[in-house]
Image (spheres, grey):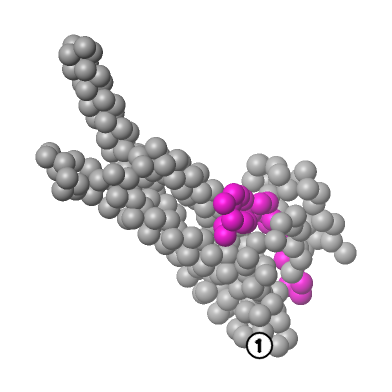
Amino acid sequence: EYSLPTREEMQEIEESSRLYVEKGALYMTAWVPVGLETPDPDNSSITFVVSPDTVTTVRYADPFAFRALPEQAKRQCTAPLRSDAVFLLTIELIVARIADTLQNIESDLKKMSREIFAVNPNKADGGAGSCDLNEVVKTLGRRSALVANLRESLVSLSRMMQFFLHNAATWMHGEVATQFRSVMRDVKSLDDYTNQQTNEMTFLLDSTLGLINIQQNQIIKIMTVASVVF
């Protein structure tokens, strides 16, 4: 019989409180993205208790990966279901969800880049298009916060998987261990991708603020000329 951590214990940030072994079971807590399809996505702390025979989760949210898990398990896992294979499939679904979200963010960034740097043929100096720069700043802020959440999740997943590989080596099946290492490489690649997106958003934000400053200067010039005329 395994004791499950409380909600307060799941919020601890010390690695010793989030990754440990007790009575032969591995207790692993990671930050998992939730509500990615909503306007207010967030991370939720989820604990996995994995033993050679069972997988138990402690969670106070319902991420998409867990809703998709039963159907995916029927299609991908052969009976009887092994705990290491189910745990691996859960991690794969979480990572795939993060990857899809990062791809959507990249599409948004490309669209914003085209709008910010679009040439307006009606302007004599060929200046930027007529997009709402204030709205662009707000959107970049929301995307930046989302990428930060996803990166936090990727880091916690990476640590959890390393802990699992090290401590479950005596009973984990060889093919599962190989797939775990493959997923870990995917996580590392996605983490690098978040760095690239962060740099891209910083550039777009600086450019947008520069264009806003130019627009404000033009307004001031017009008001100065008008005041002189009057």
Q: Is 38 left, or right, of 217 in this rendering?
A: right
Q: Is 28 left, or right, of 142 in this rendering?
A: right
Q: Which residues are magenta?
A: 27-54
Q: In the image, is residue 42 part of the stretch drawn in magenta? A: yes
Residue in the foreground of this view, choosing between 174 and 47: 47
Q: In the image, is residue 213 part of the stretch drawn in magenta? A: no
- Is 79 placed above or below 100 here? below
State whether residue 24 appears in this view.
yes
Q: Position of residue 74 (x, y in %)?
A: 66, 84
- Is 64 placed above or below 194 here? below
Q: Is 177 left, or right, of 221 in this rendering?
A: right
Residue in the foreground of this view, choosing between 106 and 88: 106
Residue ranking furthest to the front: 230
Element type at marker 1?
A: loop
Q: Residue type at mark 1? A: Thr
Q: Residue at x 26, y 25 (%)?
A: 219
Q: Position of residue 196 (x, y in %)?
A: 35, 51
How many marks the image carries: the answer is 1
